Amino acid sequence: MGPGITTSIRSRREQLRWLAVIFRLAIRLKIVAELYMRPMSPKEFYSEFGGGSLSRVSKQFAILEKHGALRRVGPRGRAAGRPGPSETLFRATEAPFLDAEMWAMLPYSIRLAWSWNAFKATAKELRGGIEAAAFDGRQSRDLTCTPLELDGLGWTRVTAALDSHFESVFAEQEDAKIRVAEGSGVLLRVGVLQIGFESPRGADLLMLDLVDGTTEPLIPFPERLAPVFADDLFLLILQELNRRSLSVPQFHRELAGDISEGAVRHRFDRARRLGLAAIVDKVPKRGAKEHIYRATKPAVDDDGAWADAPDALAETETWASFENLSALVKESIVAGTFDIRDDRHLSWSIVSLDQEGLTKVIAGIEALDGFIREEQERARKRIEGGAESLSMVVGLAVVESPISSAAVF
């Protein structure tokens, strides 16, 4: 999750509803993520990524354009040296980001599940970039995993620096596109990892009594988020289920008296089917059983991109950093510290850069790393003077040609 890059004047709640349209189908999120990097026609997207059929892809382009997620930028056809009829090119109007204010609106259980699913997807692509650098000679800035001791001021400065560099990466992409359009160089697909989170606090668990879900739905996680983003009542239900265990009648009586109990029950049941809530008790009432619900925590497993590395890769320093970072993320998700602060940072930015742009982004990451280490030294002096200590983990990497593109979280 990085800062929002928006060109609209929507309220944060309206922005979440807008994102619900994009997240409703995985293919829509894929379209917006790709078209934020480069213009494409429906036919080009279908040829490169599939999507069932060209008509289905074209329909999703039309829906996204209707909701302001895509805009037309011009035709491409014979004049550009391409055979066949002209094709309409589209660009994404905004990247599918949540800024800090929208992030803070989400229930804790949703933020935690989002972070875990985002990291798993990021780890898969990051591994592809690490392997490409190790075996194919692709350019990279090796992954570093740095434990830090900071105070509150240091934490604020470090996360602000991560946010600022996150935005600068996309500015470099725009500059690179201009240079390439003027005939200088070619664009490379590059992945930039930035992550900063609170490390586990010993044996203390901060899950706030969230429960294990019974099963992990087969529905892609972004699609499971769409109804939460779109529906104020659904969002309120999950917020309350993060605070306490509730039955449908109790929630209806206390918080939704102007809405039918059936409408409330439908959302409770949908939350359960989406793996966002679970039944934790069944209380006898008038000869029947009244179900008691609670929000769920993500299931953290060990089977991920960090497992089963070939010997040649496992022996590298970068792989050791990857394993260490993955272990710390898993531990902090289980402990509940990963998202205990709203101002943590997790972004996996897929951008198109020329050689000059790639060199600048790598230099920016190195400067960012240097600033963070200097800030730790400044924080150490403040801690010695009585400031409260905080433990933070920062991971930074730049890799060329990750295995596929993903949304930026």
Image: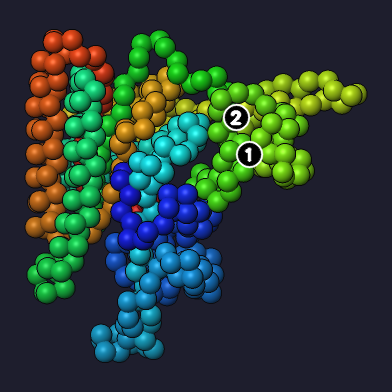
Residue 264 lies, with reference to residue 405, above or below; the image says above
Q: Is residue 292 left or right of residue 380?
A: right
Question: Which amino acid is tagged 2?
Answer: Leu
Dot 1 alpha-carbon crowd within 10 angstroms: few under 14, some 14 to 19, many 20 or more: many
The reply, left or right, for residue 369 in relation to residue 282 is left
* Residue 229 can be seen, yes or no: yes
Indicate which label's residue lies in the foreground, 2 or 1: 2
- Name which residue lies at 37% across and 86% down: 86
Residue where numbered disc 1 is placed: 271
Q: Label 1's element?
A: helix
Q: What residue type is disc 1 on?
A: Ala
> Considering the numbered disc 2 on the image, is that residue within a helix, a strand or a loop?
helix
Rendering coords of residue 280 (x, y %): 68, 23
Residue that carries the numbered disc 2 in the rendered image: 241
In the picture, the disc for residue 48 is: none
Q: Looking at the image, is mark 2 or mark 1 earlier in the sequence?
A: 2
